[in-house]
Image (cartoon, grey):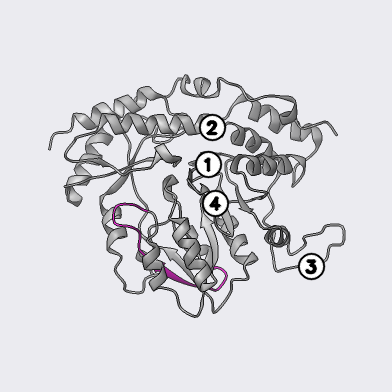
């Protein structure tokens, strides 16, 4: 078998330059723009020459790159960030009768990971001026049936994992981090996804690392790693004996996507620098406007703004719609945030979550992505500044 192409090449130093120099369609600015380099394409073709299509050397290489990038000993690639969370909860033995605490200010995949295993989802609020979870509210939700908690590091904002560690130790809770939007984002403690029992990442199209679909689960525990290997392959952790070690399913990744992913992970620092630069452009460009406010991300201390999120401060629902429609008419697409989880009928318990509801009501995202040319960001800023209340 030929060696992996990724081992024969070094990352191009012109990745971002190549990405942002592309000629994009005239007219509307892309809401999200990413880029797949020539190295990724060649590496994928190499898997065909190697006849390596399922879990194989490229998958192992991508897992090694993830471990190095996040400074964590164990990583397993899987089909999606959603399945990474299911795997993490399965490794913890979560099932019917258990309760799992989940922020309502999240994408619904977080809660579905627990509910698909038969656990009861208990929702909690976020902080007043951040989408990060309110650890104090989480503690109020702990009962004798609570077995796990799922902090969500939305858009690179790392939750207070020091406080959460104290909470989890006090109540013997398993911590599954939803870091799907936070690859390479960190605080003083370390990288998001590496601070709990297991951490889960997504490699979908609108993520920093892109393999089309895909995800990974990481851990510092050898015991959990062995359990996760079993969970990924129908309970078979050791393929030599094929002994069934744990409940599981087919959550395996494949070398075709992994060959692409190796390069995407290696390009991580360049991608981080670009999304940070976009955030900084917006921060300076809309500063002082009375109708729009940047939702902070602590980039100075290592957090990564995957997307640039803003609040329509001082605007009612109609005013926000007018602003977003105004921008759309000028070729600047925006995206309203996903609804809070308690708006789903199967998770609604009639409870109010004022902080999450306020941020949802005010929040939307501006065009961005790890390869969006700066000229499009400038056009978006110009359009925002031309809006007249």
Q: Pick the residue in front: 308 or 136.
A: 136
In primary-sequence order, the first of circles 1 and 2 is: 1
**Label pair 1/2, CB-CB below 8 angstroms:** yes
Between marks 1 and 2, how big is the CA–CA gap? 8 Å
Magenta residues, as a range?
116-131
In primary-sequence order, the first of circles 1 and 4 is: 1
Q: Secondary structure at mark 4?
A: loop
Q: Quadrant of the C terminus?
A: top left
Quadrant assignment, res 23: top left
- Residue 292 visible in the snapshot: yes
Q: Residue 269, which numbered label?
A: 2
| Residue identified by numbered label 4 | 193
**Label pair 2/3, CB-CB below 8 angstroms:** no
Q: Secondary structure at mark 3?
A: loop
Q: Residue 244, which numbered label?
A: 3
Between marks 2 and 3, how big is the CA–CA gap? 40 Å
Between marks 1 and 4, how big is the CA–CA gap? 9 Å
**Label pair 1/3, CB-CB below 8 angstroms:** no
Q: Residue 175, which numbered label?
A: none
| Residue identified by numbered label 1 | 184
Q: Secondary structure at mark 1?
A: loop
């Amino acid at each position: 078998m030929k060696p992996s192409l990724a081992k024969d090449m070094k990352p191009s130093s012109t990745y971002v330059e190549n990405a942002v120099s592309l000629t994009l369609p005239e007219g509307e600015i892309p809401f999200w723009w990413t880029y797949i380099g020539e190295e990724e394409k060649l590496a994928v073709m190499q898997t065909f020459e190697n006849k390596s299509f399922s879990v194989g050397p490229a998958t192992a290489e991508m897992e090694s790159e993830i471990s190095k990038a996040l400074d964590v000993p164990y990583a397993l690639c899987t089909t999606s960030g959603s399945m990474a969370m299911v795997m993490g909860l399965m490794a913890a033995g979560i099932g019917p009768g258990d309760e799992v605490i989940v922020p309502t200010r999240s994408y619904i995949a977080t809660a579905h990971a627990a509910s698909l295993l038969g656990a009861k989802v208990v929702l909690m609020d976020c902080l007043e001026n951040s989408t990060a979870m309110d650890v104090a509210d989480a503690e109020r939700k702990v009962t004798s049936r609570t077995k796990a908690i799922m902090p969500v590091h939305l858009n690179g904002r790392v939750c207070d994992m020091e406080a959460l560690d104290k909470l989890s130790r006090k109540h013997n809770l398993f911590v599954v981090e939803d870091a799907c939007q936070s690859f390479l984002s960190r605080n003083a403690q370390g990288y998001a996804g590496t601070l709990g029992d297991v951490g889960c990442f997504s490699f979908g199209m609108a993520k920093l690392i892109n393999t089309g679909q895909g995800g990974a689960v990481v851990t510092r525990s050898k015991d959990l790693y062995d359990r996760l290997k079993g969970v990924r392959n129908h309970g078979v952790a050791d393929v030599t004996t094929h002994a069934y070690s744990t409940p599981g399913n087919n959550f395996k990744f494949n070398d075709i996507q992994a060959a692409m992913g190796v390069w995407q992970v290696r390009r991580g620092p360049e991608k981080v620098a670009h999304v940070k630069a976009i955030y900084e452009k917006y921060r300076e460009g809309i500063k002082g406007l009375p109708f729009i406010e940047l939702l902070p991300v602590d980039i100075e201390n290592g957090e990564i703004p995957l997307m640039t999120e803003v609040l329509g401060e001082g605007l009612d629902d109609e005013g926000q719609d007018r602003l977003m429609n105004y921008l759309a008419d000028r070729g600047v697409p925006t995206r309203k945030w996903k609804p809070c989880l308690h708006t789903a009928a199967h998770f609604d318990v009639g409870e109010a979550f004022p902080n999450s509801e306020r941020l949802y009501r005010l929040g939307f995202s501006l065009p961005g992505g790890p390869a969006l040319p700066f000229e499009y960001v400038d056009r978006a800023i110009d359009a925002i500044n031309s809006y007249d209340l």
